[in-house]
């Protein structure tokens, strides 16, 4: 293996230490940061993500409130809880775990969260502000990727960046953040004609596809920085049940200059940025009341 490993666990631990210090300082000023998490239904992956978020809050000295709803809950019930949490000054961040069951209008739910408490950065106003390169709550996964690139001094201005995936929560905001940082960005997706043509030009390659080991070494430019956002559970073969990314680590790490592993790469940074957004929101709330 030739590539340098970008260690998400180590970076997350360092940043979470700083966040815990900020949370403690806020608590000492009488404003303990607080995140409210809403989970609808019984999707096992969502349940794990919510559990991890709540546990990470606790470790960082952030209060968390968790609300669980059955799969068939009416949207109006969730909306009523969001209105209550929006109005509660002791709550600084609100997150609705996605995906929501089919009876929900996801966009309407996300827009029912106060922009000032939208620590996932999915509200249309925060997305719009990001696209205009104005201050906004940044979506946690792409923001975590930017922190990882920064941690290894990747030069973004003028770099060729290729993002595979155009989802609202990863691909699109990732492309916007890289564009705002001065990279020349290509967004590839399921309709892209010759994917490898694009990926082989990339100085920075971000994979957010949701397909295990999809990006292979022959698709990577020698020396490129490869960021693997994917989290997939292998369904069969000798590694059945194990987590793997969207990048074939074994072959890509022979070609890349730097690469993130899965697990231990982008995943820990996603939750870290959620904690940071919650602390930022709490700090604003504290200042607003002169604390
Ligand atoms: P998604 O399913 O919403 O989007 C996948 C994207 O991949 C789509 O835009 C699609 O066009 C593209 N795609 C599919 N097949 C393709 C192909 N053959 N060629 C090129 N592009 C193709 O998924 P998502 O929510 O963006 O998540 C992507 C991956 O990242 C998943 O594995 C998910 O579990 C993971 N994820 C990880 C974190 C984290 O914290 N690390 C956070 C969110 C998502």
Image (cartoon, helix red, strand yellow):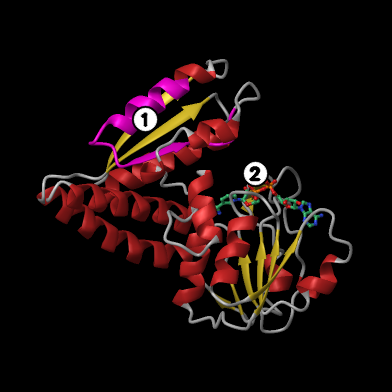
Q: Which mark is residue 241?
A: 2
Name of the residue lying farthest toward the right: 193
Q: Is residue 284 above or below residue 118?
A: below
Which of pointers 1 and 2 indicates the residue nearer the eye? Answer: 1
SS at mark 2 in the image: loop
Instruction: Identify the residue at horizontal 40%, vertical 34% (top origin).
Output: 37
Q: Position of residue 87 (x, y in %)?
A: 30, 30
* Visible residue check, residue 196: yes
Magenta stretch containing residue 226, yes or no? no
Q: Nearer the viewer, residue 89 or 214?
A: 89
Mark found first going from the N terminus, 1 or 2: 1
**What is the span of residues highlighted in magenta in the rendered image?**
78-100
Work out how far the residue at label 1 is from the one at label 2, CA to CA, in angstroms: 28 Å
Instruction: Identify the residue at horizontal 70%, vertical 50% (top origin).
Output: 210
Q: Position of residue 262 (x, y in %)?
A: 58, 59
Label 1 beta carbon less than 8 Å to ligand 1 = no
Magenta stretch containing residue 85, yes or no? yes
Q: Nearer the viewer, residue 4 or 118?
A: 118
Q: Is residue 116 left or right of residue 130?
A: left
Q: Position of residue 251 (x, y in %)?
A: 74, 71
Q: Position of residue 219 (x, y in %)?
A: 79, 72
* Visible residue check, residue 267: no
Circle 1 residue: 66
Q: Is residue 257 above or below residue 112?
A: below
């Amino acid at each position: 293996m030739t590539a340098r490993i970008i260690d998400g666990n180590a970076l997350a631990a360092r940043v979470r230490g700083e966040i815990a210090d900020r949370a403690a300082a806020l608590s000492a000023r009488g404003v303990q940061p607080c995140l409210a998490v809403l989970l609808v239904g019984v999707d096992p992956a969502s349940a794990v993500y919510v559990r991890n978020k709540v546990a990470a809050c606790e470790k960082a000295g952030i209060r968390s409130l968790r609300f669980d709803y059955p799969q068939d809950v009416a949207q109006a019930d969730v909306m009523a809880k969001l209105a209550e949490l929006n109005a509660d000054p002791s709550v600084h961040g609100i997150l609705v775990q996605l995906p929501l069951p089919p009876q929900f209008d996801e966009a309407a739910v996300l827009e029912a969260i106060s922009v000032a408490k939208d620590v996932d950065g999915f509200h249309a106003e925060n997305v719009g502000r990001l696209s205009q390169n104005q201050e906004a709550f940044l979506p946690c996964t792409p923001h975590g990727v930017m922190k990882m690139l920064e941690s290894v001094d990747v030069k973004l201005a003028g770099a060729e960046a290729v993002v595979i995936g155009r989802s609202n929560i990863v691909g699109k905001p990732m492309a916007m953040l890289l564009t705002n940082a001065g990279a020349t960005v290509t967004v590839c997706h399921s309709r892209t004609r010759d994917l490898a043509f694009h990926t082989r030009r990339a100085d920075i390659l971000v994979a957010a596809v949701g397909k295990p080991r999809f990006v292979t070494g022959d698709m990577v430019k020698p020396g490129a920085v490869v960021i693997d956002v994917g989290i997939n559970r292998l369904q069969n073969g000798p590694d059945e049940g194990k987590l793997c990314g969207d990048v074939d680590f074994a072959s890509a790490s022979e070609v890349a200059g730097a690469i993130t592993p899965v697990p231990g790469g982008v995943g820990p940074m996603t939750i870290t940025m959620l904690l940071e957004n919650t602390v930022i929101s709490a700090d604003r709330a504290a200042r607003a009341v002169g604390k």
